Amino acid sequence: MELTNFSHSVRQNSYHLVWKPKYAWDIFKFPWIKKDCEAILNEAALRYKIQIFELEVMEDHIHIFVEIPPTIAVSKALNLLKGFTSYKLFQKQPWLRNYFRTGHLWSPGKFFRSVGNVTAESIKNYIAQSNRGAREQTFLTGYSGL
């Protein structure tokens, strides 16, 4: 997981995402469904240019660590992954519709957290140091540069 350089920016857009099936049903206890879900998530990631660093399909939820393109909001990325896997799993395993009669495989809930190489404390220190330097510069020159 590295910083990505572009002509006018540098970014790191990594997230830990978690979601679960509707009713928290443990449908991924079946190895063939778990395997299908992993393959479909990898296919979705390729389609939407999402890089997967780590993926774990648990019995009743999914953990995934991803890098999202800057043109996609994290909520949109989650919707794309959930929607694509739901559509494909219902196609591949039509009997799942007997358990998810509303046509919704996933619970509407989700968890996401941005992930980086630094801690919150180091960011606070960096900002405090930067701000201290700006105050000293303003005092010395009388101009904040803004």
Image (cartoon, grey):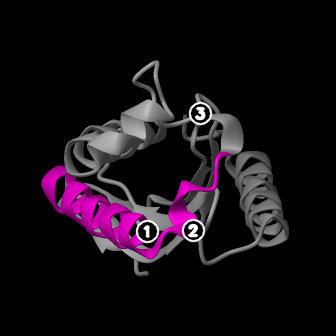
- Earlier residue among tags 1 and 3: 1
Q: Are marks 2 and 3 in contact (CB under 8 Å)?
A: no
Mark 2 lies on a secondary structure that is helix
Image position of 70 with respect to 15: above or below: above
Q: Are marks 2 and 1 in contact (CB under 8 Å)?
A: yes
- Tag shown at residue 107: 3
Q: Disc 1 and disc 3: Cα gap in Å?
A: 17 Å
Name the residue beneath numbered marker 2. Answer: 29
**The N terminus appears in which quarter of the rendering?**
bottom left
Residue for point 79% across, 50% down: 135
Q: Position of residue 30 (x, y in %)?
A: 49, 68
Q: Disc 2 and disc 3: Cα gap in Å?
A: 17 Å
Name the residue beneath numbered marker 1. Answer: 34
- The answer to if 102 sits in the magenta stretch is no
What is the crowding at mark 3: few (fewer than 14 residues within 10 Å), some, or many (at least 20)? some
Q: Which portion, as a residue range, is magenta?
A: 25-48
